[in-house]
Image: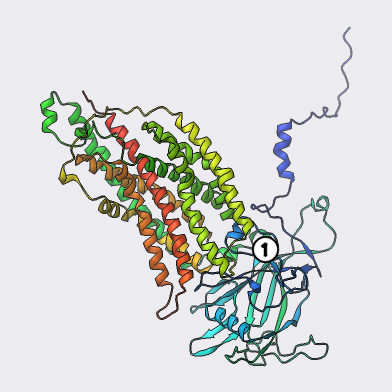
Amino acid sequence: PPPPPAPFSMSLPAPRRLPGALLLFLLPLLAPGFYIPGIAPTDYEEGMQLDVFADKLTSPKNKVPYDYYSLSLCKPSEDVTRSGKVKSKHVNLGQALMGDRREPTPFELFMRAPESCKLLCHESLDFKAKRAFKNRIVDDYYVRLSLDNMPSVLKTTGREGQEYIINGFPLGFHDENNKAPLLYNHLEMKVLFHEPKFSPFAPFQGGSDAKVYRVVGFEVSPVSIAHDPPTGDGKAVSTCPAPGAVEAPKGPLIISDDSNALDVYFTYSVTYEESDIKWATRWDPLLKASPEFRRIQWFSIINSCLIALFLTALVAMILMRTVYLDFARYNNMENDEDLEEDFGWKLVHGDVFRVPNNLELFAVLHGTGVQLVLISTFTVAFAFLGFLSPANRGGFLTALLTVWGFSGAVCGFFAASLYAGLEGKNKRLVTLGSALFFPGIAFTVFFVFNVILWYEESTGGVPFTTLLILLGLWFVVAVPLNVIGAYFGYSAKPYEFPVRTNQIPREIPRASETPLLLLMFASSILPFFIVFIELTFIMTSLWNGAVFYMFGFLSLVLVILMVACAEVAIGTTYFSLTRENYRWWWRSYGSTACIGIYIFAYCAIFLLGSHEKGEKMHLLSSVIFLGYSFVMSLAAAFVTGTVGFVSSFYFVRTIYSKIRVD
C-alpha cells in the first residue's frame, strides 16, 4: 500500500542564493551616496580648528592676479620659508594656470567658538608698503579667501533691495573725491554650518556619538578702523564695532601719502550661524542666477531658435524645391545640346571635386577642428552633468587640457584621412602640422605672457614645474598619439566621388567671382548673433571673476550654433555652385569660420566698454586679455569652419550622386 500522506507543515522552503548580478544591483541601494565631484564632506566637532586659506588678489580692472602675501599682510608662524615666503599647499593644474594658490593664513577659527575683535598681527608700513597697498586699492583688488573649500563671499544689496553675492571682499575703499584710500583692516567673518542627519549606516562608517557639523557658507564683511594700540597683554583691542553696529567707535584707517610709517592693527571677529542649507547644495546660493539674468538667457535661446528656424527654412527650400527641380530637369535631358543650353551646378560636375589649393593647410585645419569639436563636446557635457562642479576648483580647465592631450589621435587621424583621401603626397608635413600648428600658437601666446607675469611677480605666471607638465602633456602624450592617429588615417583609401574630375580646369565666369572675405563676413553674421548674448555672459563672468555655471543654456546654444553653421555652409556652397564657381572647399570653411573674427572684435569692444570714461586702462592687462581672446576666437573659427566644411562635403557628394552624367 502507498505510504501515508505527510502531515501539513508551515515551514518555508530553504532560501536560495541570490544571483551575483542581483547582488551587484542591490549593493548601491545599501550604500550612502555622496557629491558628484567626488569630494567627501568634512565633519567638524565643536571646538575643532577650521583652516582658512588665501587664494589670490584679483581685480575687475586689472587682470593681473597677485599673491596674497605680495602685500604686508599677516603671515602664519608656520609654513614659511627662510626667504620669508609662505608655502602654498598643493593645487591642481587648472588652479595653477588660473593663478590660484592655497596658502595658510594666521586666522584661528574653531567650530562654534565665536571670537570678538581678536588681534591678528601688527604691521608697520613704510612708504613702499603704503604705496603698494594704495595702488592695489585704487585698482579695486579683491581678497580671495577660502574655508573648507568654500570661497569667502560678500553680501551686498542692490538699488531695488535685491541681494547680491560677490566673490571675495575688497582690499580697501577709494573715493575719487578723496585721494587718500581707506584700508580694510578688520574682518567680520560669519561661518554658516549645518548639522547633518546621519543614516542608519553611520556606525559602520566610523561615526561617533558626538555631534558633528559641516561648513555650508563663509561670509566676510571688511571694515576700516584706526585701532588704538592694544592694552594689557598686547592682544586686547577695544575699538572694534559692536555686534550689529553700523559704524566703528574709531574713524577709518587712511593711507596717507607722507613718508611716515603707518601702524596697522589687523583684527577679525567670528560668528557662527546654523543654516538649513545642506552640504550637497551649499554652492547653490553662489551659482543661483538672478531672475533678470534668467529672462535674458531665455531670450537668447528664443532668439537663437528663431535664427536657426530661418536658416532651416532656407536650406529646406534649397533641398526640397530648387535641388529637386534641378534633379528632375538634369535627369530628363535627352541630348548634349540641352546640356549646353542649360546652366547651373551640374555644369561644374567635372571640377567640383578638384583638389583645393593649399591642401596640406586645409587638412591640418580640418583635423584641428574635429579635435576641438570633440573637446568642447566632452567638457561641456561633463560640466552639464555636474562632474565639473565649481567645488572641484580648476577641474574644468584640467579636464579641458586632459581631453586635449588624449584626443591627439583624433586630430592626426582626421587630418591624415582627408589628405590621403584626396591623394596628397606630403604626408610628413601634414602630420607635423596637425600636431604642432594650433598647440604651437596657443603655447607661444601662453609662454610670452607667462614670462611677463614672472617679471611682474604675479601668480598668473605658472611655476616652472607646471610648465614642464604642459610640455610633457604636449610632447609625451599628444604628439605620439597624433602620429599614431595619422598612421591609421593614411591607410584610408582615396575618396570615390560620384563624378570624374576633368584634367583641364573649367574657366570660372567673372560674374561669379564673389570676394572670399565679403562672403565670409556676410555669411557669418547670423551664426554670431546666435552666440552673442551667451558670449556676453561668459565674458562678463570671466572679467569680473564670477563663477559661470549655466552649462545647460550653453549646451543648447552650442547645438543651435552647430546646426546654423551647417545650414549656412550648405546654402553658401549651393549658391556658389549655381554660379558655376566650383571652388567651394575654402568657401564652405570660411563662410562659418569668420565667426572667430566677430568674436575677437566683440572681445575688443567688451574690453573698451568695461572701463568707464576717464578710467585708467592697464596695458599689460589689456594685452593679456586680447591675447587669450585671440586664441579663443581662433579655436571657435576652427570649430565652426570644420562643421561648415563637413556639412558642405556631404551635401555636394549627395547632390552629384543623384544626377545622371554621361
Q: Position of residue 655 (x, y in %)?
A: 28, 33
Query: From the image, which quarter does the N terminus lie in?
Result: top right
Place of residue 523 in the rendered image (x, y in percent of width and height, measured from the top left): 29, 52
Q: Mark 1 = which residue? A: 149
Q: For residue 653, what is the image quadrant?
A: top left
Provide the secondary structure element on which disc 1 rests: loop
Please say if 142 is above or below 309: below
Q: Quadrant of residue 116?
A: bottom right
Q: What is the crowding at mark 1: few (fewer than 14 residues within 10 Å), some, or many (at least 20)? A: many
Residue found at x 53% / y 66%: 452
Going 69% across and 52% down the picture, which residue do you hit?
34
Color theme of the render: rainbow
- In the image: residue 265, left or right of residue 254: right
Q: How many marks?
A: 1
Three-letter amino acid code of the residue under disc 1: Asn
Q: Is residue 417 visible?
A: yes
Corner quadrant of residue 47:
bottom right
Query: Percent x, y for residue 581?
Result: 22, 41
The residue lying toward the viewer, choosing from 315 and 446, is 446
Q: Quadrant of the C terminus?
A: top left
Location of residue 323 in the rendering, given as x and y in whole percent from the top left corner: 24, 36
At 58% from the left and 48% from the top, the residue drawn is 473
